[in-house]
């Protein structure tokens, strides 16, 4: 499914600079856009676009994964689904953070050798 999301987002374009940067993979831009999103009563095309672009970054960026987790808790979904989705992205955030620290530790070890 990750490839499907990446392919979908790759077909998008925007005249708004922030949104175009998010589409191009700028996690900070995607997070900024998502954090400005008010809690929706329904999932509109705009909400779906914002969350999909954030999802694109959340696969590889720990901050985007945490922002996705937080925003999912605000979505008009059944409570159990909201909780499960948010928890899964929070766990992904932990994994990405661990992976990043592990990689940094390996790099330091190599430099000392």
Image (spheres, rainbow, N blue to C red):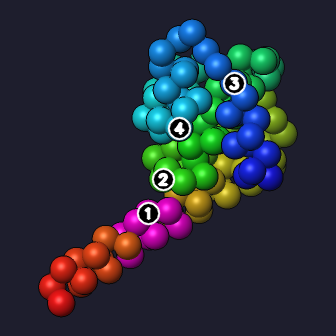
Which one is earlier in the sequence, the residue at label 4 or at label 2?
4
Q: Which residue is mark 3?
A: 12
The single residue placed furthest to the top in the displayed view is: 15
Q: Which residue is mark 1?
A: 97
Q: Secondary structure at mark 3?
A: loop
Disc 4 to disc 2: CB gap under 8 Å: no
Disc 2 to disc 1: CB gap under 8 Å: yes
Taking 84 as reference, is 69 above or below it?
above
Magenta region, residue range: 95-102
Which one is earlier in the sequence, the residue at label 2 or at label 3?
3
Q: Which residue is mark 2?
A: 62
> Considering depth in this image, is 67 or 27 the residue closer to the camera?
27
Distance from disc 4 to disc 1, alpha carbons, whole Å, reads 18 Å
Distance from disc 2 to disc 3, alpha carbons, whole Å, reads 23 Å
Taking 57 as reference, is 21 above or below it?
above
Looking at the picture, how far across and down is residue 56, in whole percent? 63, 42
Which one is earlier in the sequence, the residue at label 4 or at label 1?
4
* Magenta stretch, overall SS: helix
């Amino acid at each position: 499914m990750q490839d499907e999301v990446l392919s979908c987002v790759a077909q998008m374009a925007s005249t708004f600079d922030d949104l175009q940067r998010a589409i191009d993979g700028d996690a900070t831009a995607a997070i900024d856009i998502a954090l400005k999103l008010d809690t929706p009563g329904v999932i509109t095309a705009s909400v779906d676009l914002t969350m999909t672009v954030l999802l694109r970054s959340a696969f590889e960026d720990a901050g985007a994964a945490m922002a996705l987790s937080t925003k999912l808790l605000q979505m008009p979904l059944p409570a159990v689904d909201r909780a499960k989705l948010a928890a899964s992205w929070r766990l992904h955030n932990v994994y990405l953070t661990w992976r990043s620290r592990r990689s940094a530790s390996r790099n330091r070890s190599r430099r000392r050798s």
